[in-house]
Amino acid sequence: GGEGDEKDFEYDVLRQKEFKTQLQSALKLFATKPKKGIELLVSIGHIDKSPESIAKFFHEGQGVDKRAMGDYMGEPDEHNKAVLYAYVDSMSFAGCSIDDALRLFLAGFWLPGEAQKIDRMMEKFAERFCKDTNAFSNADTAYVLAYSIIMLNTDAHSPKVMKKMTKDEFKRNNRGINDGTDLPPELLEGIYDRIVACGFKVKDDDEDPTASPSASSGELDKASSQAKYRAEAQALMTTAQGLLKRAAANKGGAGFLQASKADHLLPMLEIGWAPLLAAFSVLLEESHDSHLVAQCLKGMVGAITLYAVFGLTSQRDTFVATLAQFTNLHCHAVREMKQKNIESIHATLAVARTIGNLLGESWGPVLRCISQLDRLQLIGSGAKGGGGLGGGKQDGGALGKSDSGHDGTAHMLIEEANSLKIEEVDTAVIDRVFSSSAKLSDEAIVDFVTHLCAISREEIQANPSNPRVFSMQKVVEITYFNMSRIRIVWSRIWSILGEHFQSVALVSNIELSMYAIDSMRQLALKFLEKDELTSFHFQRDFLKPFDFAMGNSKSADIRELVIRCLTQVVLSTARNIKSGWKVAFQVLNTAGRDTAETIVTLAFDLVRKVVYESFEQLIEDPAHGSAAYVDCINCLTTFASNDKFTAISVEAVDLINTCTRITIKGLARHAAEEAVAADLNG
């Protein structure tokens, strides 16, 4: 018996050793290829493939690479998101302030570098924090503030950031984030003080099973110190040799001193910009020599880039405005297009493509040039000043202003000649300015959207009866291109775009209003494909233009189109709608008071379908279900009170009873489930 026990013991030891070796291999693989590492961990039986098991392993597993954890949980795949959700849901932030909760959350892994991954993590964190604490009115506030705290932490503790954020700047950055109101100053001041005093830290393991036993930390530190010493010594030698060479070359004379900081150039740039601009402008205006024009334009583009990089915005804007004038697209008087004007157009488009992140206010003249370029191209294609939705005649002028009589005829002839000359401008280059807007920085896209909406308004106001819609079409395109941006940036963009859609939906031109509302329908179908986490209000904000148009349009045709578009959106995406129900019922409530039979009938058809097909799902939403129930009943009450349509009024009362029965049935089911759970636990 003793010999058998000894063999069993030896077998167990060998098996444990083999398992430990496999675990070390899996952890090492996870550090470089997280998905492969998880697959190996599952195959050796250390975890199963359920999100809960992986999340528990991340919380408890020793030696798990913290950076790989962050990358894995930040991936957009449904399984990875499920792991992230399970990881966060297994934590409790009860009793924590938001910065303490964030500190606890980020102690377990390193945040990934990709903005989209951070966005998913902050959304889920904000949802869980609000569920545990009820600290804010909604998760949007926690989401924005969490992002702001991370930015503050980076700013305060990164040696690369020279100018640190002040307490007042932090408070200013967070104005109006609590559903349009400010958070208490003492709350923000406390957060600022705590983060500046102590940054976020990732918890280290006591022991890393993936570490090589032959390489101690002392040896690694020693090797690192030696490498640093050699690098510094080499740098000192190189510097000394350079100084000696320059001293020899400048013997007997003062020579030049090499600037060691970019700031040293600022005084020279501030002094030299006006003479530079004057030299380029005079030569461009007077010369027709192609080589000289090319050199001047090269200098203009270089100056714009230089002043943009150094943040000298007024000088940058002046250079861009001057370049735009030389395109001959901004001129109030119609003039014949010359080759140097064509080259100026190419230079303007090059600026838009290459330094879009640094253009700021200069996006205005650049986008206005592009708008006028499109107008001329349409003239060349046979649409007289076209681009109007009706396809009718639009006379020339800067943004569609009409001329008449002999001068008008002469101007149109010049415009037609100019349209032939700009054929060499590749339309694909123009399209890329808009399609590449998705690559603009978070600040630059806000500037781009602001100025594009402004140009769109100019086009519409120039000829309200038959407006050009080039920029409006581009507004729709860039909305689609940028919809996948992180939510905190998207909210800033949509505050501008949504307001523009609202204003266009109410213009006097019915066809343009319909175009705006139908575009909203297409964009809403795309936007609502993405799930919304509990307590957020992104959907509500996105759908607000429908409510605005329904409540403010005097046209029955427009109000009818709003209901038709909303019907398609709701029926196609009901499974994903959460905070969006608020706006949907507001629109339907307004429709219920309408006097047009078609509008009331269409709206009531949608309410009926919502009650029979989606009401049960709607009221079970933990964050929005109660409010949606009240909104639905109020909506049906409005229909029941509309005595102009008796049949609808009667059916509305029946639907209120149906809603009550569905609600009671749901409550009974939940009570039964809780009773069964209590029996099992008892």
Image (cartoon, rainbow, N blue to C red):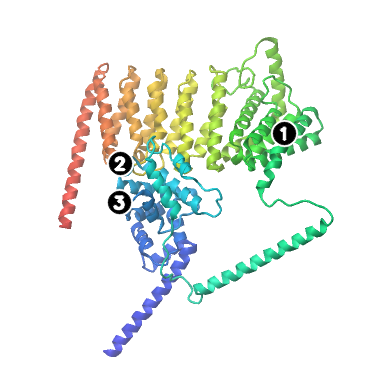
Q: Amino acid at mark 3?
A: Gly
SS type, badge 2 = loop
Contact flag, marks 2 and 1 (Cβ < 8 Å): no
In the foreground, 18 or 651: 18
Q: Amino acid at mark 1?
A: Ala
For the residues carrying marks 2 and 3, which lies nearer the camera in this image? 3
Question: In the visual, does 583 lie left or right of 611?
Answer: right
**Earlier-in-chain disc, 2 versus 3:** 3
Q: Quick one: label 1, few (<14), some, or many (20+) residues within 10 Å?
A: few
Q: Which residue, given by chain and number where applicable, does mark 1 sit on?
A: 274
Question: In the visual, does 222 lie left or right of 137?
Answer: right
In the image, residue 333 lies at what x, y percent? 69, 19
Question: In the visual, does 7 lie left or right of 265?
Answer: left
**Splitting the image into 4 quarters, where does residue 552 fall?**
top left
For the residues carrying marks 2 and 1, which lies nearer the camera in this image? 1
Question: In the visual, does 147 lie left or right of 619?
Answer: right
Question: For the residues marked 2 and 1, what is the alpha-carbon distance in whole angstroms?
Answer: 59 Å
Question: For the residues marked 1 and 3, what is the alpha-carbon distance in whole angstroms?
Answer: 60 Å
In the image, residue 567 lies at what x, y percent? 36, 30
Question: Relative to residue 271, is residue 124 depicted above or below?
Answer: below
Q: What residue do we see at 66% from left, 35% from top?
A: 315
| Numbered label attached to residue 95 | 3
